[in-house]
Image (spheres, rainbow, N blue to C red):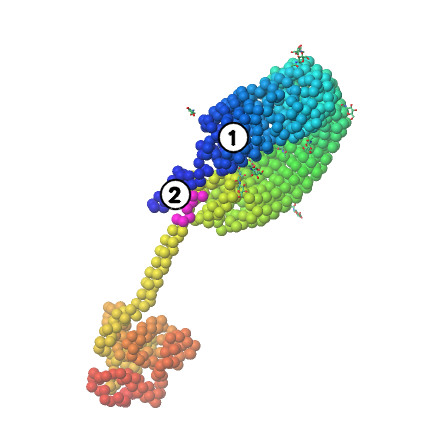
Amino acid sequence: MVPWMVMALIMATTFFSCPDPGSCHSCLEVFPSIEYQCMDQNFSKVPMDIPASTQKLDLSFNPLRSLAPRSFSRITELRILDLSRCDIQKIEDDTYEGLHNLSTLILTGNPIQSLGIRAFYGLPKLQKLVVVETNLMSLEDFPIGHIITLQELHLGHNSISSLQLPSYFASFSSMKHLDLHLNQIKNISDGDLEPVKLNPNLTLDLSENPIQYIHPGAFKGIHLSGLKLRSSFHNSTIMEACIKGMTGLKVGKLVLGNYKNDIQMTSFESSILDGLCEVDIGEFRMVQPSQFPSDGNGVFKCLVNVSVLFLVNTDIDQLTNLPIFPKLFSLSLTDCNFDIMPDLPSISLPSLKELKVTHHKDLTTLSDLALPNLQILDLSKNSLNVLSCCSDKTFNTPNLKYLNLSYNAHISLSKNFMGLENLESLDLQHTILKDHDKYPAFYSLINLRYLDISYTNTHVKFKNIFTGMSNLKHLKMAGSSFQDNILHDIFKNLTKLVSLNISYCQLERVSQETMSPLHQLQVLDLSHNKLQTFDPFICMPLLNLQVLNCSSNSITALNGENLQELSRTLISIDLSDNPFDCVCDHQIFFQWVKEHTHLLNRSKPMTCQTPSHMKDISVQLFDDSTCHMKKTVIAVSLLGIIVILLVLALVYKFYFHLMLLAGCKNIGGGESIYDAFVIYSSQDEDWVRKELVKNLEEGVPSFQLCLHYRDFIPGVAIAANIIQEGFHKSRKVIVVISEHFIQSRWCKFEYEIAQTWQFLSSQAGIIFIILQKVEKSLLRQQMELYRLLNRNTYLEWEDTNLGRHVFWRRLRKALLDGRTKNPKGAAEEEFSQPVSPT
Ligand SMILES: *[C@@H]1O[C@H](CO)[C@@H](O)[C@H](O)[C@H]1NC(C)=O
Ligand SMILES: *[C@@H]1O[C@H](CO)[C@@H](O)[C@H](O)[C@H]1NC(C)=O
Ligand SMILES: *[C@@H]1O[C@H](CO)[C@@H](O)[C@H](O)[C@H]1NC(C)=O
Ligand SMILES: *[C@@H]1O[C@H](CO)[C@@H](O)[C@H](O)[C@H]1NC(C)=O
Ligand SMILES: *[C@@H]1O[C@H](CO)[C@@H](O)[C@H](O)[C@H]1NC(C)=O
Ligand SMILES: *[C@@H]1O[C@H](CO)[C@@H](O)[C@H](O)[C@H]1NC(C)=O
Ligand SMILES: *[C@@H]1O[C@H](CO)[C@@H](O)[C@H](O)[C@H]1NC(C)=O
Ligand SMILES: *[C@@H]1O[C@H](CO)[C@@H](O)[C@H](O)[C@H]1NC(C)=O
Ligand SMILES: *[C@@H]1O[C@H](CO)[C@@H](O)[C@H](O)[C@H]1NC(C)=O
Ligand SMILES: *[C@@H]1O[C@H](CO)[C@@H](O)[C@H](O)[C@H]1NC(C)=O
Ligand SMILES: *[C@@H]1O[C@H](CO)[C@@H](O)[C@H](O)[C@H]1NC(C)=O
């Protein structure tokens, strides 16, 4: 078919030509004119087709080898440049000249042999420089001293053997992160860190250096934001000595421990951290130490003044004899091999507000925490099996605001959260819940702002499941199911809801009233359901909706008529992965899609599923001009049909008139056989036979009347008879008017034809006889007749001697009018006496 070919042609041109030169590159266009990914393309130079407006360019894994001056000066807007593993051995002077806006330069994995003294010139906004794994031996002659805007310097995996920072580091006042992991630093001496002494915002990473010795006092007076020393000490003797050498350091966050695959220290004496008594620490993290001593007292004695304590992958059976941590605010115990909850006496932890005990695969039971000040409790990713949850008694924590029980085994929510009214955030995702969908389980949580019950085996049957939570702002219930797969009005009192996630719920329908309380809703995720239609009408109450995600459903089109109900505040709508039916019925919707690409640019392209010739083609290519064409064709043919029908109707209606027209000539020249054709109602036939026929045909002069019961030719259609016999062959028409006549449609029909005939033959040929007095109102119903009667004179039948006399005289006179020749030779006697019937 022709439209198919047109469609194919359109598509072919779209695919095989490049309407916008910016869109055809050897590189992947992540965002047009902004971001290009040219990874591993065997480029030996910077590709020329990268637009000058590009801000982010990934050239990693190309054999660039050496970079000439001003290699990138054309791409002046560049902000991020990735040159990882490009086999760059030489960076000449002014290579990056012109990159006034470059903030990130990544040179990871290049075997740099020579660096021009001006190699990094012309980078006035450089903030992050990554020179990991680049054969760097020393910082002394690394030519970056002029880049005072530098915030992050990544020098890991090189061969730097001394921490002695060159004096130019003093000018890096914005420096936040200095990463020297995996180098060859063995000794830390006095004065090494002198240039960064005045920068309390710096985090220094010395992990995986073979540190042997820290000169006591090397850190004296140094104030760091963070210090990482993971896998930095070969054995516990060295570690203990080095920590002692850190005397006088003030550090916001100290991280000690190992990496999983590194050699583990064999023994871990409780005295090992003794040196920390002379270090001012805010947050202490211990990651994966081996054989952490169970004698808590000894290990922690120098850590009592920390405010945050993290123990990750620390093999402790029990935390016993804990010293008093007067300032400890947050305690996190991650994957520490507990199989029962650690006993944390509130006496030891008077300030504790945050407790996180997570990732313990053997931890199955809860126990009383008795930490009255606790506000944040994270027990996620354990194997908890809680039979009766939750109330203030469950944890003995009446001030709890945040509770995370996600990723556990089973929790039975049978306690209504009594006494936990302060709770603001509750995360139960991926934990099998019981009993919560039969009664208002969250009834007490009037302050709750955040609730996550995604993937908790929730089956919503009970309409009041969310009753009580009138302050809820965020509700996530992905992976739930609903009775009959219909979403009913379960959100009745959630008038403050801002985001709602009901993805992966197998929903087939959303009922009309569901959304009506959600005036504040901004984000609605309905993706991965089984919705077959989505009427934007349900969004009408959502006056603040900004993000709507309906991707991965079974929607064939949105109802075009209600698209304006989608709030004006919408900034993103995702309709991808739906089986769109690209037919003209949905033309309004596809037109809307074309006009609202800015709402759809965050999502994957929308493609057609049906009809088959459009399968997998973008709905943007849906050509609605074919619909206009079809419409025109339909309109034209409809019009044609109407015209034909009209003509047929007219022909039918005026069939007789036309026949008369055709017979005009005959009328003009034809001989009249009858003097008059009598039209009357069959009810008046008696009068016609006994009075009219008798008086006129048998009287002198006699008139020849045409009477249908007598003169019509048998076997010929009545209509044809009326015309051929009645009108064509009669000079005059006598219309006998009575109530019967007026009521009879047949008479009316004959009479209408008579009118035409009168008109055609232009003879004043109609004689009206009023047989009975007819009700005026009845007469008025026959407007035309009424009009004619008023215009023409008529004879009234009066059944008295005098009346009859006058009547017959006048009738004869009227019949004689226009009679040229008396066929029977009696024309002279104009006013002969009528035969009295008496
Ligand atoms: C990469 O490009 C060079 C020439 O620039 C060519 O000799 C080589 O075969 C190419 N390698 C691949 C894998 O295409
Ligand atoms: C750099 O960024 C600023 C805004 O951050 C912009 O005005 C300017 O045009 C950009 N380009 C150059 C070459 O400076
Ligand atoms: C490191 O310290 C040890 C002993 O304290 C010393 O023998 C060695 O020379 C020092 N090495 C360097 C590179 O300073
Ligand atoms: C450290 O950072 C804070 C905020 O991040 C800033 O206000 C302060 O000025 C910085 N201090 C120095 C010495 O740069
Ligand atoms: C730790 O290592 C140093 C140097 O490698 C060695 O002298 C010392 O004996 C070791 N200590 C222990 C306890 O293994
Ligand atoms: C903890 O701080 C107190 C005073 O704030 C001080 O007396 C005590 O020595 C500190 N303890 C440690 C181990 O640093
Ligand atoms: C609860 O814990 C899980 C797993 O640790 C985490 O992914 C989630 O973000 C937490 N919930 C909240 C509300 O912080
Ligand atoms: C819903 O809220 C209204 C007022 O905010 C309150 O009167 C009504 O009782 C609440 N209904 C339920 C079922 O909680
Ligand atoms: C809704 O939940 C699903 C499943 O947990 C998640 O993938 C999706 O990102 C969430 N949507 C929003 C808008 O957060
Ligand atoms: C819509 O949801 C799908 C699946 O959860 C996700 O991949 C997509 O990024 C979301 N779209 C937007 C615009 O957030
Ligand atoms: C999508 O379009 C909006 C409005 O035109 C624009 O502000 C936004 O930056 C675009 N987003 C992307 C990812 O192109």
Q: Which mark is residue 310?
A: none
Measured from the top left, where is residue 215 in percent x and y? 70, 16
Measured from the top left, where is residue 422 in percent x and y? 70, 38
Q: Which mark is residue 10?
A: 2
Mark 1 vs ligand 2: CB below 8 Å: no
User: Mark 1, residues whose alpha carbon is within 10 Å: few (<14), some, or many (≥20)?
Assistant: some
Q: Earlier in the sequence, mark 2 or mark 1?
A: 2
Along the line of sight, the residue nearer the viewer: 557 or 41: 41
Inspect the image, locate mark 1, and give the three-letter code of the amino acid beneath it: Arg
User: Quadrant location of ligand 2?
Assistant: top right
Q: Is residue 634 above or below residue 311?
A: below
Mark 2–mark 1 distance (CA, rounded to whole Å): 43 Å
Residue receiving disc 1: 70
Inspect the image, locate mark 2, and give the three-letter code of the amino acid beneath it: Ile
Visible in this render: residue 437? yes
Q: In which quarter of the view is residue 741 placed?
A: bottom left
Asked if the stretch drawn in magenta spans residue 622, the answer is: yes
Q: Is residue 258 above or below residue 307?
A: above
Measured from the top left, where is residue 502 in percent x and y? 56, 40
Describe residue 282's horizontal placement relative to residue 74 as left or right: right
For the residues carrying marks 2 and 1, which lies nearer the camera in this image? 1
Q: Residue at coordinates 25% horizontally, 71% vertically from top-left?
A: 663
Magenta residues? 620-626
